[in-house]
Amino acid sequence: MKRFLWLGILFLSASWLFFIPQFTIPDAVMGTLLVILGVLCMIGGVWHTVPKHLDTKYILLLIPLILALIVVPYPYNLGLAVLTIGLLLSVVFNRVETAQAIPLGIALAGVILLMQTTVFPLYTIFVSHGHRVDILSPVISLVGNLLGLHTSTNNGIMFIQTIQHTYPVTITWEKLGCYLLLNIFLGALLLFALRYGKRKILRNTIIFLLTSSIYIILRFVAILYGYLTTTELSIFWDPLYMTLSFLPLALLLMKLLPLKDSDEETIRVPSLGFTKKHLVVLLMMFLLVFSVIGTFTFQDPGTIKNGRVLIDEYHSQWEDTTRPLDTEWYGLLSTYNYYSWAQWLSYYYDVVKNTNGTLTAELLNRYDILILKCPTESYSMQEIQSIKHFVDNGGGLYLIGDHTNVFGMNTFLNQISEQFGIRYKTDATYELGTGDLSIYQPDRLFSHPVIQHVTQFDFMTSCTLEPTSLLASATMENIIIGNRVTSEPGTYATENFFRESVVSPDSEYGYLLQAAAIKYGHGRVVAFTDSTVFSSFSMFTDGYPSFTLGTMEYLNRTNSYAYLNIIFIGIALLSLVVLFVLLRNVKKIKILWMLLFAGLFAFSTAAPLFSYLTNVSYPLPAVQTDYTHICFEQQHSSFNISVKPTATLGNNKYNYGTFFVWTQRVGCVPSIEKSLKDAIANGDIIVIINPIQSFTEPEIQMLTTYLENGGRVLLMDSITNIKSTANELVGNFGIWITINTDDHRVYHNLSEIDGTSPIGNITSPYLALSGGKRILIAGNNETYASMIEFSKETTGNLGKLVVVVDSYTFSDAVMGGTFTEPTERQRQIYETEFFLLDSVLK
């Protein structure tokens, strides 16, 4: 029966492949099924190795367990939940001798899952800092040739020759299945430690490592045969394939290491008693875990500087910041630039652009933050030393690169970044399995100050980063480690250095480093890998504004308390030494219980404490220069705003990305707000498009108060919006939207009352307006834009409600994309938007 423990470890270990989005979207059903199978195997494995009665003091562990369950998010609290169930059942079955294995097996499964969760962050950091295992390429090539493949190696890459193709293959931790193997090893190590003495633990560990090392090489060769047969890359990372491929290893270990009872110790649970020595042990364990968490997660709040920012244009001919985004200049480069990004920064900081000078020490000493974005020219040695000295003296350095070394920018950035231990790679990233643009969602716990205010970050093809040395890896701060991402090498054979194919076995995938920071001397460096996202056409969507401000606020500080991380390391080492002395004669089960008890208490204290300190120390900065904030409200509206270049490829009649971006041309800063309450709280202007959600009385009252206090609301509706709730709102203010069924009319050219800018209504039947002050009318005297003005004597502010039909006119289907060279007709529609925003609402 004890041999079932190996199957239990395998199933528990493999469940994480389905719960955690390392390679695929989580599959909770499969993950849960594997946990159940694993628990059943663990129960079977310990069926004959439990005492008659369990000491009820063990259930005191429920106290820190419940606290940790509150702190740790799903699915990382899975082990905590299983262990909690096991302890609760131990109370239920305490007097039932034949059922003692049930709670013990469940609790053991919970501890294994908890161990795997604890090591997971370290694994993530390790693989994201270096995926390739080039040292194994010659070994695997030799084994592959012995087993019938035709292979050779060069620079760590293995090449497999077939009749039709030669395939380049990189050896990576993920392709070897090392995450699953690591989880199995952790489970095995726990059982070895609980069942055996030191010599047998060492012996079994050596047998396990030798067996598994040979197995993963043979397994990899078998996977290569599968790839050559199917040409499906998913065979390397698919969770189900990976689980099945490790089943023979579990069966082999059942034979080699059957986990029979040792003469020294079996899995038996001693009574739980405490002495003063044990209390000291608990304290040392608490300090150990608390200080280890502090070492990794404490962020020096630093000393805030003056926020003087220098953007270097002298070395960059891409993503220009100097030419304004206005109402005259259109086409690709009009929005594929950094003008809006730089303007946004100027609302919060004192921003200067360097357009005609080298980066000397004298120049840099006048600023607090230096931004090097998309360099297309190299830096001189004098400039490199000046920048390094600038950071060492407390300066903040922001490096922005992009995919595949396009325009040579990553080569030029590496001249600077490698001085601080960071290297830009010449690759391109995509979503694993689909080839789509990747999306990053930060974890709730331990987010870096740069990313902590971002809920979702959409990439538009980044490169990846890597540390230049082990020391750099140890001191590097991981801002974004992307998951479900694949990295394809760049090539100089195509335009923009993209590969023609993104399905190749020399790709890297899994956890990839896409943004990092490092503290150097008194200063700080942030390296980012996707320049496109800050372009004017996309700057105010998908988490980019918060990321930008978070980065600047992190860099706008000199290091003040960096020594605290070193103190935490010292406390951890001291605690470890004391524990080594005190625990020499303590039963293993008791050691495990005390470690869980103190460790969970320490984690439940340290995790929220350090997260809170980071949040308090790094708030988003306050605006220094007022701007007009226009909020697109989603709660009641029915629209899509996508500004990605791919948005123009599909059905875009419901997409208003261009209308959204064009608000920037008249000096507005747009945002998308999920609720009406948020839009009212943040917006100078609120835009509601094609409303389909009913407006409640409190919401109408909120909007009325907002308008009376000087707020502005633009509501646009369409004849295609058959579920419209617009009249529920605007009817309260004396404006009504009506349907005209004149089938002989295709569209009217409308003109503003005080001008000649036309707008097209291209549906039949079509909508018209009654009531309010007419803003846009047709030749037949029908109204297509009306306005109600609100004033409050106590404030003197003038609020405005503007209602416009037909909203379809302002969709991307009519206005085109953000890179469009407009026709005369489109220019007329643009002018109408500018008139409504600039002349009426602003």
Image: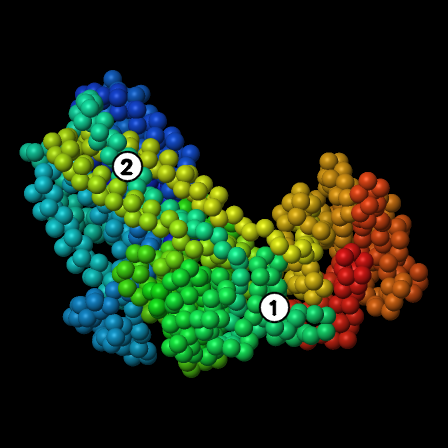
Q: Of helix, strand and loop, which one carries label 1?
A: helix
**What residue type is disc 1 on?**
Tyr
662 and 641: which is toward the camera: 662
| Residue at screen point 88% across, 50% down | 772
Judge from the rendering whether residue 9 lies leftward or rightward of residue 204; answer left or right: right
Judge from the rendering whether residue 572 lies leftward or rightward of residue 66; answer left or right: left
Q: Of helix, strand and loop, which one carries label 2?
A: helix
Of the two numbered discs 2 and 1 on the same chain, state the one appearing first in sequence. 2
Tell me where residue 433 appears, x and y as whole percent: 42, 61
Quadrant in the picture for residue 587: top left
Is there any visible trace of residue 485 in the rendered image?
no
Q: Residue furthest front?
A: 362
Q: Are marks 2 and 1 in contact (CB under 8 Å)?
A: no
At label 2, counting other C-alpha atoms closer than 10 Å, the crowd grade (few under 14, some 14-19, many 20 or more) is many
278 and 159: which is toward the camera: 278
Tell me where residue 832 appears, x and y as whole percent: 79, 65
Colour option used: rainbow
Residue pointed to by mark 2 = 287
| Residue at screen point 45% across, 74% down | 360
Is the residue 117 above or below the residue 542 in the image? above
Quadrant in the picture for residue 200: top left
Q: Residue furthest bottom?
A: 493
Is the residue 761 above or below the residue 584 in the image? below
Checking the image for residue 339, the label placed there is 1
Is the residue 379 above or below the residue 529 in the image? below
633 and 618: which is toward the camera: 618
Judge from the rendering whether residue 842 lies leftward or rightward of residue 47; answer left or right: right
| Residue at screen point 16% across, 53% down | 209
| Residue at screen point 35% across, 51% down | 562
